[in-house]
Image: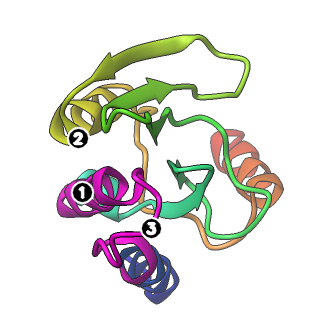
Amino acid sequence: MTNIVDAAWRKVLTTYGEPSRPEESPLLKPFAKLVRVAHAEPLLRQLSPWTGMWELHLSRCTEMDYTWDIPYIGTLRDGRYYVEGPSRSSPRIAETDSAQDAVAMVIDRLPPGCGPAFIGNAGELAAYEKARDSR
């Protein structure tokens, strides 16, 4: 794991890993649990995390534009989770009551040879993989 990936996880854990004030969004507590459960998984911890709209995304690269080849996990209003992806146009994979189950679904769908995260963006990663595979 790189220092860049470690720093990205620290930021996500610091921002969302601990539930805060009671007036915060009702999504904060289940999302905080999701972040901690995902971080506990070595296969996911080597990927670069990013968040938005109460979703946890994981990328095979460390910079924007990120990869969109890994399913992501979102938090529902009732505290449950959904797994979708890998792209926004992909159908929902499942809904579950358990952060552990949602994380397991993502792990089961990781691309072959996934991780550790490539230092750079998705375009640079694609160029690197193309050059590597053409040898």
Q: Nearer the viewer, residue 80 or 7?
A: 80
Q: Earlier in the sequence, mark 1 or mark 3?
A: 3
Q: CA distance from mark 2 to mark 3?
A: 20 Å
Q: Residue at x 44, y 14 (%)?
A: 93
Q: Quadrant of residue 39?
A: bottom left
Q: Earlier in the sequence, mark 2 or mark 3?
A: 3
x%, y% of residue 118? 58, 65
- The residue at which mark 3 appears reads as 24
**Amino acid at pointer 1:** Lys
User: What's the residue type where badge 3 is placed?
Assistant: Glu
Q: In what quadrant of the picture does the C terminus appear?
A: top right
> Contact (CB < 8 A) between labels 2 and 1?
yes
Residue 64 x, y percent position in the rendering: 77, 64
Q: Is residue 54 above or below residue 16?
A: above
Report the front residue among 41 and 14: 14
In terms of secondary structure, where does tag 1 sit?
A: helix
Mark 2 residue element: helix
- The image's mark for residue 33 is 1
Examine the image and state in which quarter residue 9 appears: bottom left
Q: Which residue is mark 2?
A: 99
Q: Which residues are magenta?
A: 14-41
Residue found at x 22% / y 33%: 104
Q: Residue at x 62, y 69 (%)?
A: 62
Is disc 2 surrounded by few (<14), some (14 to 19) or many (20+) residues within 10 Å?
many
Q: Is residue 105 above or below residue 94?
A: below
Q: Secondary structure at mark 3?
A: loop
